[in-house]
Image: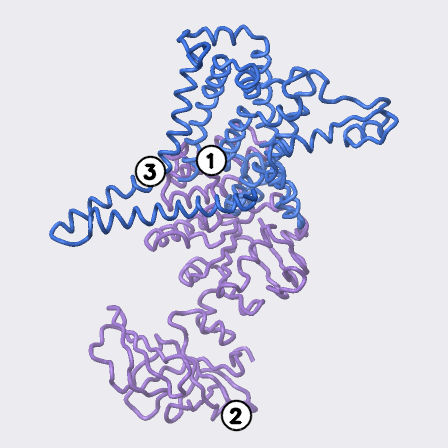
Chain colours: A purple, B blue
Amino acid sequence: MANLKLTGVQKTYGGSINVLNDINLDIQTGELIVFVGPSGCGKSTLLRMIAGLETITAGEFTIDGQRMNEMPPAQRGIAMVFQSYALYPHMTVRDNMSFALKLAKKTPAEIDAAITKVAETLQLTEYLDRLPKALSGGQRQRVAIGRSIVRDPKVYLFDEPLSNLDAALRVATRIEIAQLKESMPDSTMVYVTHDQVEAMTLATRIVVLANKGIAQVGTPLDLYERPENEFVAQFIGSPAMNLLPGKIVETGDVTTVRVDHGNGVIAANIPSKPDMKGAVVNVGIRPEDMTPVTGDNYAFENIVEISEALGEVTQVYFKRQDVNSSPVIAKLPGIHRDVRGQRMRMSTEPEKIHLFSEGVSLLYR
Amino acid sequence: MNPALQALVTIIVGVGGCVGYFYFSNQFLDKVLFPAKGPNIARNITRANMIRPWLFLMPALLALSVYLVYPVVETLRLSLSERLPGNESRFVGLANYQTMLEDAKFWEAMRNNVIWLLVVPALSTAFGLLAAQLSDRVRWGNIAKSMIFMPMAISFVGAAVIWKLVYDARPIDQDQIGVLNALYLFFGGTEPQQWLTKLGWNNFYLMAVLVWIQTGFAMVILSAALRGIPEETIEAAIVDGASPIQVFFKIKVPQIMGTIVVVWTTITIVVLKVFDIVYAMTNGQWETQVLANYMYDKLFRAVDWGVGSASAMVIMLMVSPILVWNIYNARKEMK
């Protein structure tokens, strides 16, 4: 049982270097919250502040209503899994897992029972007397996870736990973590990653961090379908959402826009207020929502510059009319041969369109 | 010639000679002996490459044989022979060793060496580890480190002279220039003490000098080792509930144990050979004799080659196993 609450949390290094500002976040018991964001956005710092490895410059952090700011890490009821596993190299797997229990003055019988149980769950029984250096990367990560489970903490913290594993192992371990979460419905987990797939598949809710603050908090599909701002829209989903400059021509329950380099008008299932008429907006269309059209109403038209056939999809890159911006990308299902050099017109369904005015989605205005 | 000029010429000739040797012998090998051209080019290159390591190692091998291997053999021979008039000598078997073992001064030196061996490496390593750990945690740590390291730059004789002044005693009616006596009188002592003549204790006053020197060495090596410990293992231990002292002894020290052993054994070897400090401060009087000074006494003061060489062999036999262990551990650390 653990509710985590961050109120106005701020982190400043050396009195002047501000990395996080005014973080407000409520984490409920049983949630698996994932922090994502570009490198240097402070996601690991935030996790380390929850762990107690970094001091909180301003604001308050509570677990179950109890102030934690000044509480040493060991008394917060948390356990942490590190990116580099952080196993104690001079101790066997058994000693690694029992270290915290011994420090907590548990009896040998209790320690033994806890380790036997966890080792069985994580299939580590036969490795208990080995040193970490005699284990593979995946096994080491399981020991690191086991080390946190034996302590039976209220809150689990994961700091990019999969990024040192190879691709196949990463998928397997990701699924193991998901199953682990399911087997412990009462534990709260906070997970930091830069990998979108991990975030989308594991999270109950995702916290997107950017510009020293929280860009959006929501369920994975919320962030995908209803991004609050251009940053989240482009950060979630790969390749990133295309943003095409345009103008609102008709307001109401359905907003009609004209894209600068498109033709005719296209409709979006987004309501807008009458005073928005004529406003400059960015029309967001995800690459996977872009479909080739033949009529005169389209959002974008140009020659395909590069095409990447991945088998299940073909990614095509268009050069933009305004020189210095990133290419427009479309993901066409299936295999398309010889699309390179072709002139194509692209558009999408009204419900797949996102509209952003001054960086903020019209959905949230 | 002016000695300074002489030194300069020596340096130029010495360094120039070394560079010249490597350059010209290499040229000779590649251009004259096995030139990389002609019908046998492949064979020549292979042969030149087989010879090159020996060519480059030769000066070191020669110097080592003349100044290390030969003296060992000659010392062994001398320790087994008796000196006769007219630069003659006669084989006497283990008689010199017998004489030495019956000499009370030898056993005093052995006892003192064992005490040095137990105290100095332990204290130097412990103080070095402490200094390394603590100086990393304060802002002025680097200044502290330089201060602690500085004695390393002083020769043993220089250090001995400095510490002789620390232990110096003046008559009661004069100002004490010895820091220890000044403190002693300040804190209520009545009479200046001749510290270096205090039997039993004076050994430890001498050891303090070597500990003072070697702590800097231990600190520098151990500080580097401590910084090599992955930060995340320390953080994991903190999250696991370890106190700073538990982190230090249960997480940090075990991870640098290999380095600690290397430092310990290196200092042990220095201690076994300790000579200058004892020679300059007490010359083995007042029961402070050590093996190296005993050897010097016999060889050059009593001109007893036999017993002197025998004691030199004893020192070598004591150093060798520790040296082997030291190198074994150092290699393991480097992997």
User: Residue B13, relative to residue A238: is it above or below?
Assistant: above
Q: Which residue is mark 1?
A: A90
Q: Residues within 10 Å of mark 2 (few under 14, many from 20)?
A: some
Most extreme residue toward the right, as rendered?
A: B173
Which numbered mark, 3 or 2, is in the foreground of this view? 3
Residue matched to label 2: A277
Nearest the camera: B219 or A127?
B219
Q: Chain of mark 3?
A: B
- Is residue A291 visible from the viewing direction of this image? yes
- What distance separates the C-alpha of mark 3 from that of mark 1? 42 Å
Identify the residue at horizontal 70%, vertical 29% (top origin).
B164
* Dot 3 amino acid type: Met
Residue at the spot x=47%, y=87% of the render? A255
Residue on which disc 3 sits: B58
Q: Nearer the viewer, residue A239 or B32?
A: B32
Residue A332 on image: x %, y %: 29, 76
Name the kind of residue labelled 1 in the image. Answer: His
Q: Are marks 3 and 1 on the same chain?
A: no
The chain ID associated with circle 2 is A
Q: Nearer the viewer, mark 3 or mark 1?
A: 3
Identified at 60% across, 19% down, the residue is B115
A268 sits to left or right of B28: right
Rendered location of residue B168, percent (x, y): 75, 27
